[in-house]
Image: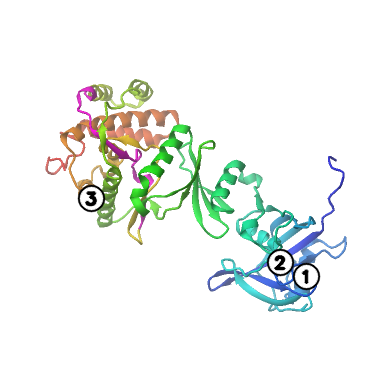
Amino acid sequence: MSGAQRHTEPLDVHLLAVRDGAAGPEVLLSRRAGGVYAAGCWHLVSGHLDGPWEDVVTALVREAREESGVVIDPADVRAAVTVHHRSPGGDARIGVFFEVRRWEGAPEVLEPAVCNAMGWFSFDALPEPMVAYCRAGLDAYRAGARMALHLQEPGDPIAYDRTADRLVLVPEPAARGTVPERAVRAFAEQAVGRITAWADVSWARDESRVWRATGAEGGEWYVKIHQNDRFHHREVDALRDWIPGLGAAAPRLVAADPSLRAVVLTAVGGRTLHGTVHPPEQQRLIFHRIGQLAATIHHSTPPRPAADSLPVAKLERHLAEALPHLAPGDEEFIRATAGRAAALAPLETVPTHGDFQLRNLRWDERAGTLYVIDFERSEPGPAVRDFVRLSDAWHGRPDLLQAVMDGYGRRFTPEEEAQFTVLSVLDAVSGIAYGTNNSDPELVERGRRTLARLRTATPSPTEHPATGGAL
């Protein structure tokens, strides 16, 4: 025993009677009255155990009958959440909250000396004032937590006040890894307020981690932990510099912490285009919007002087790792293509996304709106850089290529076509090497497809096969 005083907290039981309402789930609440603690505040039907021999389920059934008149079968009682609470005055207790969705009778006030109102309320429109302890239990329940702490400080109001919200959710053992570490959670909540639900939405092949965070008042954000400092600074710089020029098509930076390599971003709508299927006419519309979005990215800031050279420095290392998966003749083609890079005229640089492909594009079908996410590979570069990974999506579909270029508003220049080929080869080799080292056959196959396509393309990878002319 490390302390001088043992805890002797009272044990409370709380009824979460839940029903389906016109606007969604509703919960039964009663308003405290008379000379009781927190008179005038709304609370759940609740009470204490009646002596040392009464169990918590029996106590809940009894309190529900005595306070509201409803009859509950113990078999219909479901464990919801346990809250360790401390009041502003320093008194502590343990509250056990139970969900019940079936009972007999209509709830009514049966103890008017201590309760002067009772009613059903939507979880999204809870009444005020409400006992902070009760609100903590409701919020923990909605977040799916099994245990929570609600340790108020001296001077905190008895009624719920979002500026003095002390709720802390305790993760379950089975949920390890589904929420960020404590320091990241604290950083995010300092930026947007208390977060009641976390969902890990990380892309399977990336080491960067992404969570969707839902706030106590229903707001939604994304919290991202970058895998290295370089990616963190790239994304933050882009979010602060040129991404605001994209308007509603991209998330906004809410907060950044370089020591954690963490950012909080506003949420965008839509569903990823990766793996989705749309009718041909709608596909053409989407790809036209993709071209328009690429143009907006590339014109978000004035162009800069031409870059010196193409990124061929890592070719030999990537090629050595990719060799077991290359087709006959691929190595010679790769070396010959990369060898032409030094003779190519450098192109002016513009803001580029760096990973402009379907998985980072989201389409809201109802609104007809396209969004772009994930800017950790963003850096200044030639505009054609952003079409390299996208080109796999239009392969065999000249109508989609035409839609992209129509949206973009211009054709590639011959100089851009030449750089596009080199960049595509380098990206294919890099993808095969990465996929090999990280057991990702999808990346390996995409790289192999790209090389096969480039080797048969005449004279360029963005040529329309029906006309033989560049778009």
> Where residue 100 sits in the image (x, y, percent)?
68, 66
**Residue type highlighted by circle 2:** Leu
Q: What secondary structure is marked by label 1?
A: helix
Q: Which percent across, then down, holds residue 71?
A: 74, 74
Residue 439 seen in render: no
Is 460 left or right of 20, judged from the image as shown? Answer: left
Residue located beneath label 3 in the image: 407
Figure quadrant of the C terminus: top left
Q: Amino acid at mark 3?
A: Gly
Colour scheme shown:
rainbow
383 above or below 251? above
Nearer-N-terminus badge (3/2): 2
Mark 1 is surrounded, within 10 Å at the Cα level, by few (under 14), some (14 to 19) or many (20 or more) other residues, namely many
Looking at the image, residue 344 lies above or below residue 394: above
Residue 360 highlighted magenta (yes or no)? yes
Choose mark 1 or mark 3, whichever is in front: 3
Instruction: Say which amino acid is labelled 1.
Output: Glu
**Distance in Å between CA atoms under marks 1 and 3:** 66 Å
Residue 156 vertical placement versus 242 (above, below)? below
Q: CA distance from mark 1 to mark 2?
A: 9 Å
Circle 2 is placed at which residue position? 15
From the viewer's perspective, is the residue at label 3 or at label 2 nearer?
3
Q: Which residue lies at the image location 37% right of the left edge and 21% below the top edge?
A: 317
Find disc 1 in the rendering and name its residue: 63
Q: Circle 3 — which element?
A: helix
Mark 2 is surrounded, within 10 Å at the Cα level, by few (under 14), some (14 to 19) or many (20 or more) other residues, namely many
What kind of element bears circle 2?
Answer: strand
